[in-house]
Image (cartoon, helix red, strand yellow):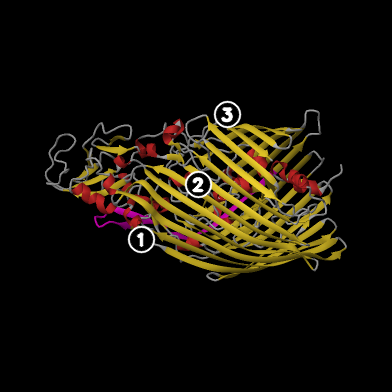
Amino acid sequence: MNFRMKRIALALSVLGGAMAHAADDGVTQLERVEVTGSNIKRSIKQELAQPISTIRTEDMTRQGFTTVEQVISSLASNQAALVSASSVQTISGGAAYASLRGLGSQYTLILLDGRRVANQAISGYATDLNAIPLSSIERIEVLRDGASAIYGTDAIGGVINFITKKSYQGVTVSGELISTAHTGGGSGNASITAGMGSLSEDGYNVYGSLSYQKTDPITTNHRDFARQYLTASNLSGRTFPGNFTYKDKAYNLASPTCQPPYSLPLGSLACGEMATLYMDLTPKVEQSSVTAKVARRIGEHTLSLQYLGTRIISTTHISPEPLTDIVTLLPGDRYYPTRLPDGTPTDGSEAVVNTRAVPLGPRVTESRSTTQRIAFNAEGVIAGWDYKGGVAYSSNRTVINFKSGYVNSSTVASAIKNGSINPFGPSPAGAWQSVELKGDGWIADFVTTMADLKFSKELFELPAGAVATAIGFEARHEKLDSKIQSIAQYAQGSGIADSKSTKGGRTVTALYAEADVPIIKNLDLQLAARYDRYTDFGNTFNPKVALKYLPMPQVMLRASASKGFRAPTLYDIYSPDNATYTANKFDDPLRCPGGVPANGGNEVNDCNTQFQNLQGGSNNLRPEKASTLSVGVVVEPVKEVTASADLWWSVVKDSIGQLDPGIVFSNPALYAERFVRNPNGSLKYVVTRSQNLGTLSAAGVDLSLILRSPKTAWGNFTVNLDGTYTSKYAQQLEPGGAYFSPLGGWYKDVLQPVVRWKHSLAFNWNNGPWSGALVQNYMAGYTDMNPKKQRHKVDSYETWNLSANYVWDKKLTLTAGIRNLLDEAPPYSNQTKSFQVGFDPVRTDPVGRSYFLKATYKM
């Protein structure tokens, strides 16, 4: 059977997108292009010796995906640990990150048209996926392999390159509505793109695009699966009406009935707050973006200037602010409790108040994240050398705003003490509002400025073919400036009350070279090396070698090996300290050893409760060093079948992270210095700033299968399977410590699970103006956080997306479909790492079935 390697290269794309892209653009076989994974321009007939997938945006929107985050989450090779829903429980600014092969977001390099985009400034060890508008992206190229020698030392886990439109003519208007089968989560978006001029005929092109999208929030009360498993173990001792500690025991004047459904009995004489009922499952999100590009062709040279700006407003609701040990009441104070709940008179001993600002409602945080990027690019041919170079400026500003529900710690205690506010019942009108705190609490800026220039050329001929090379230079400056605003010190429930402003920067310069050498017929060698100099962490040299061999026309073998080096990011070093409540509950080892109150402790404040966890950057960090290896095979026994398998293995030494609070509480003797206490001996917080944890090692296999039917009267049919099986994942949690594995399930309550198998299976059909797709996204089950509970296994999670598409006169395109066709609810999980309860918001989607209708008209 006639075998063509061009077909292999293009068929390996997700949903066969690259082939369609080449056809749409009218690319000739002789055109030389740059492909992610190499700096050498080459004919599109040539294939690289590393696994690359190409995803067309058009194919993803037909599944009902409206954001880059949704597209990347569907990739089999991606297992992220931070998604938009994570902003409900953390100060993340609504960011979502990619994590190829589950290694960590910090090891996946995000590029836009081959260049970096500024990291998100609040949680900023990576580029926020939501900062890239899907409407501006033509295709996405995913390199599932180490690329430190090509793009930068930190491209250890792989590269995701978002490619915008090279040029555009005409006017296109698009709109989409998404309606959910359940309350909450609906969405709508609209965009317009207009351009004029042809680079080939007129010598210029100008185009611009505007887009807007809004997504409604989903709350705990919107979904049965998010509240049906709430039990007494979810109750918080910070409640309203408030508890008070009297002679080392907790009481509540509203006990035993309390005030359901939010305030419920906790023990015999106290109450607890069902704080989860106030929580969002997903935030309200608004995204506005603008893209503009001007390109001019002068002979063999093309000059372009591009701008991209995105603003995201993410709004989250969490429980009303807890007020822990907020004030001590004595006889004579207006609200001093003169009797206990059973009617027993108090004897004048002090009463320490633990309450919650329920009258102000939930805490509402608005995160405003603005990303801007302007880039000048020049490319063409000089003296027979292909060249490409330019300069780019990229910035992200993220602002954390206390919208409502936050309490001014400097005034609330005195208001309770003087009787203005009643912590145990109704207060005079406006009393709580007088102590409410509003305004910007944290403003952070991350700026990346860079310049690069590279050349590539076929130098000379060998018997087996031409030797090609590329050389290049890059320089970039990064700057982080985190400004904690003055009001933050009074917002005790914000997580940044004890934070201080920080800032820092660095410059990185690099020289790199690459060569493509045909050793013998059908055996090609790729060599690459990069030398980087960091102004704060010294020099590093990282090589890469890759081989591609065709033993027969139907088989291609490939392999690559590379080194990597990741200097601590500015976020790792300069992130301000921030104290947030742990999602998990713990016992104070001093005041509640073994779950039994002692040494002045009590069951409400010191046992099975959430404590403050102080996180932040550190200047006492070492760089990480990595090794990556992959070996693969691609076969096409007949032209209707293409299959591939790529084995991969990665090791990262001195990995940087934050010690999990669970580790600290599990060994209080070893980590005694991390427990910081109040003057009365109660626990103020535990310290888990960034540090070098140890070694991370992972391995697995990426699998791909494409089946194509012969052309029939009923149209063309294809089946695409893209899957990743992770066979090893082991990590040290502390320097020199033992290795632990979250593969196939949680490691205690510390390491989030890495699923063994994840895949996307697509059935595609097209016939003239009609096309359709049925796509399954599947993730294997895993062992739950607490395997001792009755339900210890999290079931597998799969969703089916169905869509139909019609094109009229090449102008009007209509798409209708259903996401999560079977209305699959997230499987039950007893995890307590997230504030959302009863399911895992990181690995699953709480939206449920939704219906979408999209119309696009090109004038």
Is 31 magenta? The answer is no
Of mark 3 and mark 2, the one earlier in the sequence is: 2
Badge 3: residue crowd in 10 Å (few <14, some 14–19, many ≥20): few
- Please name which of the two marks, 1 or 3, marks the residue nearer to the observer: 3
Q: Is residue 376 visible?
A: yes
The residue to which callout 2 is attached is: 752
What's the residue at 41%, 50% (across, down)? Answer: 662
Under tag 2, what secondary structure?
loop
Between the C-alphas of marks 1 and 2, the distance is 26 Å
Q: Main secondary structure of the magenta part?
A: strand
- Can you tell which quarter of the image residue 637 is in? top right
Q: In the drawing, what numbered circle is on residue 822?
A: 3
Under tag 3, what secondary structure?
loop
Of mark 1 and mark 3, the one earlier in the sequence is: 1
Amino acid of disc 2: Gln
Residue 462 picture location, percent across and down: 86, 64
Of mark 1 and mark 2, the one earlier in the sequence is: 1
In-front residue for pair 229/821: 821
The residue to which callout 1 is attached is: 673
Between the C-alphas of marks 3 and 2, the distance is 27 Å
Q: Which residues are magenta?
A: 676-703
Between the C-alphas of marks 1 and 3, the distance is 52 Å
- Can you tell which quarter of the image residue 266 is in? top left
| Contact (Cβ within 8 Å) of mark 1 with mark 2 | no
Badge 2: residue crowd in 10 Å (few <14, some 14–19, many ≥20): many
- Please name which of the two marks, 3 or 2, marks the residue nearer to the observer: 3
Residue 604 picture location, percent across and down: 28, 43
